[in-house]
Amino acid sequence: MIESQTLIIFLTATLAINISPGPSILYVTTVAMAQGSHAGILAAFGLGFGIFVHVIAAALGVSVIFASSTFAFLIIKLFGAAYLAYLGLSILFSQSVSAAPAMTVTRYRPLKILLQGFMVDLLNPKIAIFFLAFFPQFVVQHSGNSFKQIIVLGFLFIATGTTVNCLIAFLVGRSFQQSRFLRNSFFSKWLPGGVLLALSARILTLER
């Protein structure tokens, strides 16, 4: 089992990491801005599912391949950047939702939002490398199976991150729903699309 002192330190570090502005928070924010708080919350859960794959990979040691292989890192990076660019362009070239504010929260497909969130974090190579560096610091060798410890730590990381992202999605979505100013095409279309394109460009600059 994980020692209580180690667990407290881990949770503190995890909370600090998850509340820091980053790709996940920006993605959830853009979805909530464009499609409402419900869609943003679904996106947050999709991100959590994507991170779960990275947790399993880290626990199994599969992430070592991506950390040590320049080619594997490059392939994942290119796919991730391309996917974010696709999402950003889809928003920019979609029909503006500002003409029908009442439909903002309902105009989304739940499974599609979940899948998009899943793919966004799944195709982020930095997550795999980060977990390889982060989790081992909290694994206590004499406390039992390291695989089980990493799985537990991973679930706690996902739960914390998903909670933070859901809260942000709710607040952003409600703010946009209640404000005519925020529902104009710049905030509901151009800003979210631009942020996703910026994230795509940011991934292209990642180095191992």
Image: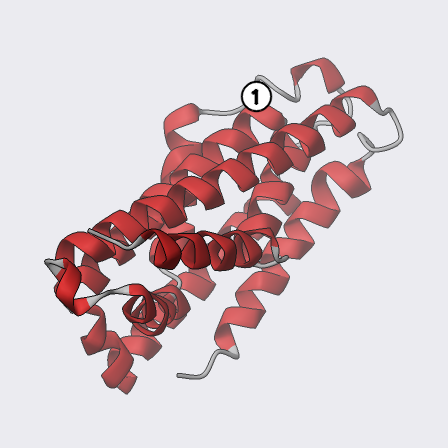
Residue 93 visible in the displayed image: no
Q: Can you say whether 47 is above or below 114 in the image?
A: below
Colour scheme of the picture = secondary structure
77, above or below 89, in the image: below
- Spot occupied by residue 126 in the image (x, y as percentages of width and height): 40, 70
Instruction: Work out whether 182 lies above or below 63.
Output: above
- Residue 48 seen from this side: yes
Lateral position of residue 54 relative to residue 45, left or right: left
The reply, left or right, for residue 142 in relation to residue 207 is: left
State which quadrant residue 194 falls in. bottom right
Q: Secondary structure at mark 1?
A: loop
Front residue of 3/179: it is 3
Q: Which residue is mark 1?
A: 107
Which residue occupies 57% across, 70% down?
201
| 182 with respect to 7 (left or right) | right
Q: Nearer the viewer, residue 191 or 10?
A: 10
Badge 1: residue crowd in 10 Å (few <14, some 14–19, many ≥20): few
> Farthest residue toward the top?
102
- Asked where in the image residue 164 lies, by quadrant, the reply is top right
Q: Nearer the viewer, residue 27 or 81?
A: 27
Q: What is the total number of numbered labels drawn onto the structure image?
A: 1
